Image (tube, helix red, strand yellow):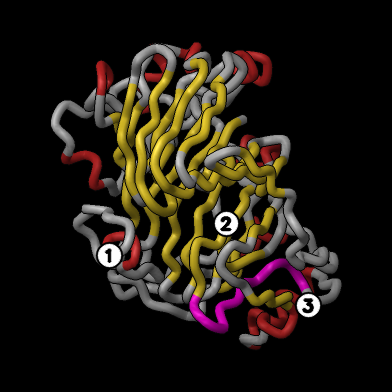
């Protein structure tokens, strides 16, 4: 059983920058480089395996051939597998020799991304599972953000500052005054936010973020700052759908709370977010650490700083560096990490 290093898909959304290429080594020929979908089986952005027996295959195809790599929890939950139609994709990974896309299915329940917001993202909202599956043939989208870095003064939008109504929002959009109804939150390096489906939100200019989300690509834009895309057109807004899925009450307090850090010889670990869709943990490796990948769930490692190697009791071994993502199949067993690095570890 291999430890799989992944090649991401890139996205050139108009609000992106160059930090993912400049600081994280993303060799993707697009400018701006707004997002990299590091671990994904969604048809809008497929990851490709770079090493081992599955080299050149999409992760989606590998998991279809080896469903046991997902783990027994996925069997119990079921999935939207095979129900999401393929869409036109913009992906640097199509250049990889031997990459296969026929019979790809969206079998992985999460997507792990880097997001470089050089400019403000749109004010937007995502539907829950029930609405998305009925009207979009996709999953809903609850997500978490881990702030890798943020420029001085960077903020984000998280829900409303006071209760609103459909009428208030319609008037605000017509008058270009939506901003006064939104809750603004200053962000700093190492902040964590959980953004459940239905929360109106927007990532602010200057934030470099890791996003862990349900495997979905459904976004309803409320406002996009009247920007023009590369084709000279304003991007589509989706008010009529957005109003049906958003929470119009006061947003919850999102101040940062102390996190419990557990220290071990050579490393430390802390839970950043735990919800019904995924758990995200940060591991700081000073020399080494070990953990087990049980048969219940796959795990994903994303290196946000440093470098190292990871090996398993099966004899598999892979080196990694800043910006790289690794998929660990369920049942891989005891794994050992050596080096000096900072990792985010995701499992379901």
Q: Is residue 241 left or right of residue 224?
A: right
Look at mark 2 in the image and give the residue it sits on: 146
The answer to whether residue 324 is seen in the rendering is: yes
- Disc 1 to disc 3, C-alpha distance: 43 Å
- Quadrant of the rendered image containing residue 132: top right
Task: State which region is magenta.
Answer: 151-160
How far across and down, in percent of the image, does residue 171 sit? Answer: 72, 81
Q: Is residue 300 above or below residue 166?
A: above
How far across and down, in percent of the image, does residue 229 sit? Answer: 35, 72
Callout 2: helix, strand or loop? strand
How far across and down, in percent of the image, does residue 155 sit? Answer: 60, 76
Pick whichever of labels 2 and 1 is earlier in the sequence: 1
Pick whichever of labels 1 and 3 is earlier in the sequence: 1
Cβ atoms at labels 2 and 1 below 8 Å apart: no
Q: Is residue 315 above or below residue 319?
A: above
Q: Nearer the viewer, mark 1 or mark 3?
A: 1
Q: Nearer the viewer, mark 3 or mark 2?
A: 2
Look at mark 3 in the image and give the residue it sits on: 168
Callout 1: helix, strand or loop? helix
How far across and down, in percent of the image, does residue 169 sit? Answer: 73, 75
Q: Which residue sits at x=43%, y=48%?
A: 341
């Amino acid at each position: 059983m291999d430890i799989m290093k992944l090649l991401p898909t890139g996205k050139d959304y108009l609000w992106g920058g160059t930090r993912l290429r400049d600081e994280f080594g993303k060799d993707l020929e697009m400018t701006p480089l707004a997002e990299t979908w590091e671990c994904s089986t969604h048809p809008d952005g497929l990851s490709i395996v770079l090493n081992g027996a599955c080299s050149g295959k999409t992760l989606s195809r590998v998991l279809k051939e080896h469903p046991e790599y997902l783990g027994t929890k996925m069997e119990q939950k079921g999935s939207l597998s095979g129900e999401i139609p393929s869409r036109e994709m913009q992906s640097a990974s199509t250049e990889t020799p031997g990459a296969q896309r026929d019979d790809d299915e969206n079998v992985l329940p999460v997507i792990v991304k880097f997001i470089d917001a050089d400019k403000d993202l749109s004010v937007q909202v995502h539907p829950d599972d029930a609405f998305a599956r009925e009207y979009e043939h996709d999953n809903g989208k609850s997500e978490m953000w881990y702030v890798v870095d943020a420029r001085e003064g960077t903020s984000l939008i998280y829900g409303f500052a006071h209760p609103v109504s459909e009428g208030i929002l319609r008037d605000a959009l017509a008058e270009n005054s939506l901003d006064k109804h939104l809750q603004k939150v200053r962000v700093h390096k190492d902040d964590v936010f959980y953004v459940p489906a239905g929360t109106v939100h927007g990532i602010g200019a200057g934030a470099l973020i890791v996003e862990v989300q349900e495997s979905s690509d459904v976004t309803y834009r409320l406002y996009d700052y009247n920007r023009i895309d590369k084709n000279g057109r304003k991007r589509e807004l989706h008010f009529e759908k957005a109003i049906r899925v958003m929470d119009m009450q006061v947003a919850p307090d999102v101040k940062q709370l102390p996190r419990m850090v557990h220290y071990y010889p050579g490393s430390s670990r802390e839970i950043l977010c735990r919800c019904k869709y995924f758990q995200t943990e940060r591991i700081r490796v000073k020399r080494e650490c070990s953990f087990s990948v049980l048969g219940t769930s796959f795990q994903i490692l994303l290196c946000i700083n440093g470098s190292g190697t990871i090996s398993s009791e099966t004899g598999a071994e892979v080196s990694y560096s800043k910006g790289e993502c690794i998929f660990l199949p369920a049942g891989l067993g005891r794994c050992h990490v050596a080096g000096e690095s900072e990792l985010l570890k995701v499992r379901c």
